[in-house]
């Protein structure tokens, strides 16, 4: 019987990493950005918007991984398929 890749699915690992980095950037953008930083970026809070984008991307990767899981065949099915 086949089983799902679960936590070993690379899409979920990527989603977690993007989520962590995105939350960190969003917090830095919300709480630790001053006028000098905004002046360097032409008034755009780059940390905030990059963080929001990364969190959205993490959600997309997680949804993709959960809605379309990778099915790993068992050894018996592999042997039957090769014979």
Image (cartoon, rainbow, N blue to C red):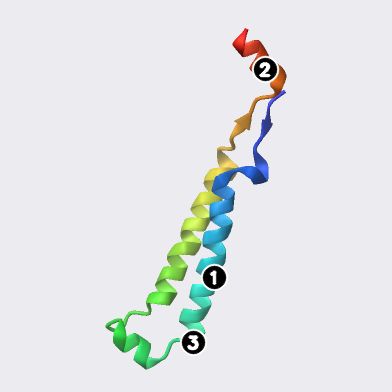
Q: Position of residue 76 (x, y in %)?
A: 71, 17
Q: Residue furthest left?
A: 42
Where does the C terminus fall, quadrant-wise? top right
Q: Is residue 11 above or below residue 4?
A: below
Could you tell me which residue is drawn at 52 percent across and 60 percent down?
A: 18
Q: Are marks 2 and 1 in contact (CB under 8 Å)?
A: no
Image-based side of 74 in relation to 57, left or right: right
Sequence order check, earlier mark of 3 and 1: 1
Q: CA distance from mark 2 to mark 3?
A: 55 Å
Q: Which mark is residue 50?
A: none
Q: 64 and 40: which one is in front?
A: 40
Q: CA distance from mark 3 to mark 1?
A: 13 Å
Q: Which residue is mark 2?
A: 77
Q: Position of residue 5 (x, y in %)?
A: 64, 38
Q: Position of residue 32 (x, y in %)?
A: 49, 87
- Between marks 2 and 3 in the image, the one whose residue lies nearer the viewer: 2
Q: CA distance from mark 2 to mark 1?
A: 42 Å
- Between marks 2 and 1 in the image, the one whose residue lies nearer the viewer: 2
The kind of secondary structure element at disc 1 is helix
Q: Are marks 2 and 3 in contact (CB under 8 Å)?
A: no
Could you tell me which residue is drawn at 50 percent across and 63 percent down?
A: 55
Q: Residue furthest top?
A: 83
Q: Which residue is mark 3?
A: 32
Sequence order check, earlier mark of 2 and 1: 1
Q: Which residue is mark 1?
A: 23
Sequence order check, earlier mark of 2 and 3: 3
Q: Position of residue 56 (x, y in %)?
A: 47, 60
* Label 2 crowd (10 A; few <14 / some 14-19 / many >=20): few
The kind of secondary structure element at disc 2 is helix
Q: Residue furthest bottom?
A: 35
* Label 3 crowd (10 A; few <14 / some 14-19 / many >=20): few
């Amino acid at each position: 019987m086949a089983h799902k890749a679960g936590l070993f699915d690379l899409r979920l690992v990527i989603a977690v990493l993007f989520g962590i980095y995105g939350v960190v950037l969003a917090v830095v953008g919300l709480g630790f950005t001053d006028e000098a930083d905004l002046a360097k970026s032409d008034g755009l809070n780059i940390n905030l918007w990059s963080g929001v984008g990364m969190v959205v991307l993490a959600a997309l990767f997680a949804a993709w991984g959960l809605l379309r899981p990778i099915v790993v065949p068992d050894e018996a099915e592999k042997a039957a398929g090769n014979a």
